[in-house]
Image: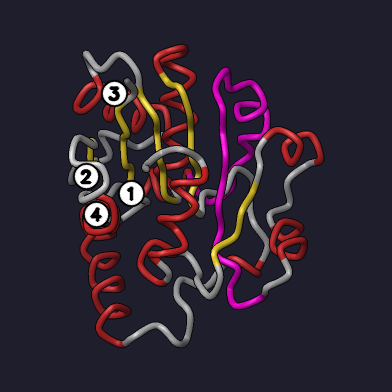
């Protein structure tokens, strides 16, 4: 039976996943990125290698659920581990540089306490993370890597309050072959943190892709 691995985004912490899914996935692996101001993990490849070494050695069958940078890391991990990875799920994870549509973090309607908690987390994380790693995430093209994943892959993005799924998909700037390879769903009334802003819709998405029951 596969074990789920929950990877947060850049400057994010595992609670963004743990508080949503722990009750549904008590055996899940919840990743927290290390403090790395010195730049020991300054590249995306090094990030994936670190995650494999620290969390995934000895785990035979894995499903990788990655938020933002965690999704990019999931693609790299899947390339390294091959058949051990059974599925990759991308959550607000950008395989090519996205358009302005995706630049906002949270909906204006997000409760103040939740907004503050997310912003405080990001501020803490940015102080701990390698600037070089952050720079490496600015311009991406993971099209070929994603096209050649051996496993099933799916993706979900916040709709920023726009119910037109086609417009959301177009804003991703994915080439047609990538759109054919990876099915995309949207989460209503959410931005970069759909698991915080619309948790019930994200839980349903995770059930739809058979990550949880």
**Residue 152 part of the magenta segment:** yes
Question: Which mark sits nearer the N-terminus, 1 or 4?
Answer: 1
Q: In the image, is residue 146 part of the stretch drawn in magenta?
A: yes
Tell me: 165 left or right of 55: right
Q: Helix or strand or loop: what does disc 1 sit on?
A: loop
Quadrant of the frame with the N terminus: top left
Sequence-wise first label, 4 or 2: 4
Q: Element under label 3?
A: helix
Q: Which residue is mark 1?
A: 8
Q: Do callouts 1 and 4 mark residues in contact (Cβ within 8 Å)?
A: yes
Q: How many marks?
A: 4
* Residue found farthest to the front: 213
> Where's residue 29, x and y in %?
23, 36
Q: Secondary structure at mark 4?
A: loop
Tell me how far mark 3 sits from mark 4, CA to CA.
17 Å
Q: Residue at x 60, y 68 (%)?
A: 159
The tag earlier along the polypeptide, 2 or 1, is 1
Find disc 4 in the rendering and name its residue: 13
The image shows residue 162, relative to residue 156, as above or below, that is below
Location of mark 3 (residue): 52
In the rendering, which numbered label is found on residue 32? 2
The residue drawn where x is 64% and y is 56% is 98
Q: Which residues are magenta?
A: 137-162
Q: How far, Cα to Cα, is label 3 from label 1?
A: 15 Å
């Amino acid at each position: 039976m596969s074990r789920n691995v929950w990877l947060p985004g850049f400057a994010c912490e595992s609670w963004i996943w743990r508080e949503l899914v722990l009750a549904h996935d008590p055996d899940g692996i919840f990743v927290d990125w290390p403090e790395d101001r010195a730049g020991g993990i300054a590249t995306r490849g090094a990030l994936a290698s670190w995650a494999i070494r620290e969390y995934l050695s000895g785990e035979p069958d894995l499903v990788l659920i990655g938020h933002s940078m965690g999704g990019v890391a999931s693609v790299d991990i899947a390339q390294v581990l091959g058949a051990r990875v059974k599925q990759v799920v991308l959550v607000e994870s950008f395989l090519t540089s996205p358009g302005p549509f995706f630049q906002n973090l949270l909906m204006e309607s997000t409760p103040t306490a939740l907004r503050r908690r997310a912003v405080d987390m990001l501020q803490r994380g940015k102080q701990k993370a390698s600037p070089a790693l952050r720079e490496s995430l600015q311009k991406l093209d993971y099209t070929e890597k994603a096209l050649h994943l051996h496993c099933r892959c799916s993706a979900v993005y916040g709709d920023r309050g726009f119910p037109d799924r086609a417009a959301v998909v177009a804003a991703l700037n994915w080439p047609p072959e990538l759109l054919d390879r990876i099915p995309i769903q949207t989460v209503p009334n959410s931005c970069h943190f759909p698991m915080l802003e619309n948790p019930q819709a994200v839980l349903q998405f995770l059930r739809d892709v058979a990550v949880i029951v």
